[in-house]
C-alpha cells in the first residue's frame, strides 16, 4: 500500500497525495540510474541547438553547434551559428567569448569544483540525490524521441531557480535540458547525435583570445 507523505509548512502538516509521492520517487529513481550510467563514460560529444528567452525584454535568441566534454572538468560548446561564439572550460578556467555580441572582449572565470558550471551533464547527473528535489512530470517527445520529463528544484542556492531534464526512454540519454535562471531567463539546450567515449582533438578544450581582445577576469 502506498503511504501518503507529509509536507511541513510553518507549524502545520499537509498530506501529499500518493501521486505526488510516486512522481518524486520515480523521478529520483530515473535520474539516479542515469547518473550511474554516465559515471562510467569518459567523453561525450553531441550536436546542440540552444534557445534563450528573455521574458522581461520579450527577446529570443537561438544558436547551434557542437559540444564535447571529458572527465573530470573539460567542456566546450563551439557555435557554428552564430559562428565563432565559444564557451570553454579548460580544466583551470572557464572562457566565454561571444564575438556575435562583442568581438573586443572575452571573459575568464575560475572553475567551481563543487558544481558543473557550464557542463550540464556534470551539473545535473552527478550525485543528483544530494542536490535536487526531483519530480517525474510526464512522457514527452524531443526531436522525435520518446523521453521522460523530470523537474528539478535545487536544494541549495544556485545560479538558477529550477531545471527540467528530458531523458531518452531507451538508455536514459540526456536529450534536452531547460534552465530557468535567477533573472528569469529561460535557456533550452537540445542534443542530437550523442556519442559516448569518442576521441576528441586535443585543442577542443583550449581557447586563446584573438589579438587585441580584452580579457576580463571574474
Image (cartoon, rainbow, N blue to C red):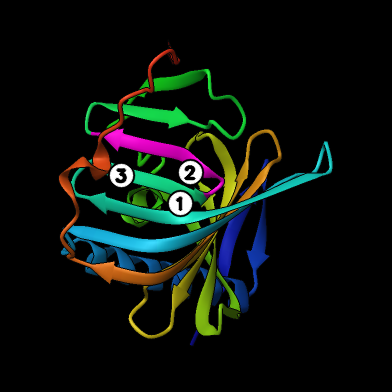
Please tell me which residue lies in front, 38 or 92: 92
**Would you say the residues marked 2 and 1 are in contact, meaning their CB atoms lie under 8 Å apart?**
yes
> Relative to 136, is 30 on the left or the right?
left
> At which x and y percent is residue 105?
50, 18
The C terminus, quarter of image: top left
Q: Residue 155, labelled with which disc?
A: 2
Per the image, the residue denoted by label 3 is 75
Residue 215: % across, % down: 42, 13
Magenta-colored stretch includes residue 27: no
Vertical arrangement, residue 80 with respect to residue 107, above or below: below
- Residue shown at the point (28%, 70%) measured from the top left: 195
Name the N-terminal-most of marks 2 and 1.
Answer: 1
Which quarter of the figure has residue 45? bottom left
Label 1: which secondary element: strand
Q: Position of residue 189 (x, y in %)?
A: 53, 57
- The image quadrant of residue 200 is bottom left
- Callouts 2 and 3 close, C-beta under 8 Å: no
Indicate which disc, 2 or 3, sits on the residue closer to the N terminus: 3
Between label 1 and label 3, give the one nearer the viewer.
Answer: 3
Look at mark 1 in the image and give the residue it sits on: 132
- The magenta stretch is 81-90
Q: Position of residue 93 (x, y in %)?
A: 30, 26
Which of these two is toward me, 91 or 160?
91
Q: SS for tag 3? A: strand
Amino acid at each position: 500500500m502506498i503511504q501518503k507523505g507529509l509536507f511541513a509548512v510553518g507549524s502545520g502538516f499537509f498530506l501529499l497525495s500518493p501521486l505526488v509521492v510516486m512522481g518524486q520517487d520515480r523521478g529520483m529513481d530515473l535520474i539516479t540510474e542515469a547518473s550511474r550510467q554516465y559515471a562510467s563514460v569518459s567523453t561525450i560529444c553531441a550536436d546542440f541547438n540552444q534557445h534563450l528567452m528573455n521574458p522581461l525584454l520579450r527577446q529570443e535568441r537561438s544558436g547551434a553547434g557542437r559540444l564535447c566534454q571529458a572527465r573530470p572538468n573539460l567542456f566546450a560548446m563551439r557555435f557554428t551559428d552564430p559562428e565563432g561564439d565559444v564557451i570553454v572550460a579548460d580544466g583551470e578556467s572557464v572562457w566565454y567569448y561571444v564575438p556575435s555580441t562583442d568581438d573586443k572582449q572575452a571573459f575568464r572565470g575560475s572553475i567551481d569544483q563543487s558544481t558543473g558550471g557550464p557542463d550540464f551533464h556534470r551539473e545535473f547527473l552527478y550525485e543528483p540525490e544530494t542536490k535536487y528535489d526531483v519530480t517525474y512530470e510526464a512522457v514527452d517527445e524531443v526531436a522525435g524521441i520518446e523521453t521522460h520529463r523530470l523537474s528539478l528544484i535545487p536544494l541549495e542556492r544556485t545560479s538558477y531557480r529550477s531545471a527540467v531534464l528530458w531523458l531518452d526512454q531507451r538508455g536514459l540519454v540526456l536529450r534536452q535540458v531547460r534552465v530557468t535562471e535567477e533573472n528569469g531567463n529561460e535557456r533550452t539546450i537540445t542534443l542530437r547525435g550523442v556519442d559516448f567515449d569518442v576521441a576528441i582533438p586535443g585543442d577542443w578544450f583550449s581557447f586563446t583570445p584573438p589579438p587585441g581582445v580584452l580579457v576580463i577576469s571574474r
